Image: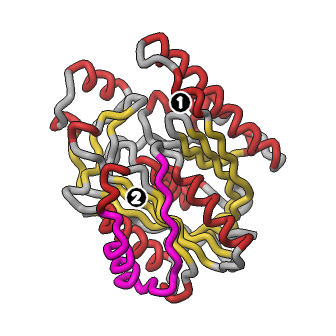
Amino acid sequence: MIRLSAIGSALGRKSEVTRLPLSQESLARLGAGRVRAYSDAGGATLVAMAGRAVRASLACGHVDPASIDAVVLCTSSYWHHRQLNPRALSSALCELGLERAQLFLTSVPGCHNAVTGLRLARGLLRSEGLQRVLVCTCDVAAGDAHRLGDGPSVLGDGAACCLLSTDPGEGYALLGLERSDRHVMSRHADDGAGRQLLGAEWLGEVASVTSRLLRRHGVAPAQLALLAPNNYNDGLRATLAQVVGVPLDKTVPFDEHTGHVWSSDPFLALTRHGADRLYGGDHALLLSTGPYYFGAALLSRLAPWTQGGATACPASTA
C-alpha cells in the first residue's frame, strides 16, 4: 500500500481582486463566481514558497528529513524557471535537511500537476525501491497583470507538499490515479464558438477520466465522501460536481480568499476539510485539471483519525 500523509502548505497574504488591473466586465464575472480575493506571495520566489510547504509537511508528519529518499517538485510557472537553478535548489534542500534526497522536477503548463507529481512519486516507490518521497506543488503568478485565469478565476500564489510512503500509519491510502492528455483540444479557435466547444469537450473529458478511475476500483460516485477539484470559482465547482455525479454538499466549498492556487488546490482542500469530513474507509477524489490535461486521484481515509495528526496541518501564511 502507498500512503499519502503529512500535507503541508504555504500561502501568501490575502489580496482583494479589486486591486488588480481588470475591466469592470471581468470583475463582474469574478464576482458572480464569488471570487473575491487571492493569495499574493509578495515577491517570494518559487524556491522560498516550496521550502515553506516542505518544512510544514515535515513538521506536520514528524518526519526526519534524513529519511526522505526523493523530492518531486511540480510547477507550471515556467516564467520563473531561472529561479529553479541547480545552486538555488540544492542549497534549499540542504537547508531543509534533505541532503540525501534525489530531486525530480516536472513542469507542464496547466493545473493538473498534483496528479502528475503523485504519479511520478508512486513510480519511484514501486520501481526504484524508495520508501519516502515528498511531492511539492508550487506556483507564483507572473505578475498582477497576468492573474486572470480560465473559469473565470484569479490565480493565487502558493505551495503544497505531501509525503508518499510505504510506511504504515495514518493518512490516506492512494488507491489509484488516472491521467489524460487531450492535445487536440488546443486546435479550437480562440473565439466565442471555439471556447464553447472547448468547454464542452473539457467537461466531457473530466467525466471520462473520473468515471474510468472510479469503475476500475469499484467505487460509485455516490460512495464518494469528498470531491476536491481545483478552486476556480463557485459556479464551476457546482458544474464539476454535477459532471462527476457527486452531490454538491460532498464537494469542497469554494475558498473565496486564496484564489485558484494552481495544482496545489486539491491538497489545500484536504488540509481544510479532510479532518472534519472524512473518517476511516471514506473515499475522496482529487480532481486536478489543466486546459488540455486531466488527472484524478482516488484516496481512502485510513483509520484512526487523530485531530492535528500527521495527515494535514495549517497552512504557513506570509
In the depicted structure, whether residue 203 falls above or below residue 1: above
Q: Is residue 103 magenta?
A: yes
Give the amino acid type for the residue marked by disc 1 in the picture. Ala
Q: Nearer the viewer, residue 233 or 47?
A: 47
Q: Is 209 left or right of 315, judged from the image as shown?
A: right
Q: Residues within 10 Å of mark 2 (few under 14, many from 20)?
A: many
- Residue 16 sits above or below residue 133 on the image: above
Q: Which residues are magenta?
A: 83-108
Can residue 290 be seen from the camera position used here? yes
Q: Secondary structure at mark 2?
A: strand
Looking at the image, is mark 1 or mark 2 nearer the viewer? 2
Give the alpha-carbon distance from disc 1 to disc 2, as whole Å.
26 Å
Location of residue 243 in the rendering, given as x and y in whole percent from the top left corner: 64, 29
Residue occupying the point 79% across, 45% down:
219
Height in image: 280 above or below 71? Answer: above
Proximity of marks 1 and 2: CB atoms separated by less than 8 Å: no
**Count of residue discs:** 2
The residue pinned by badge 1 equals 238
Between residue 183 and residue 291, name the one nearer to us.
Answer: 183
The residue that disc 2 covers is 138
Q: Is residue 265 magenta?
A: no
Q: Image check: 79 left or right of 306?
A: left
Quarter of the figure with residue 175: bottom right
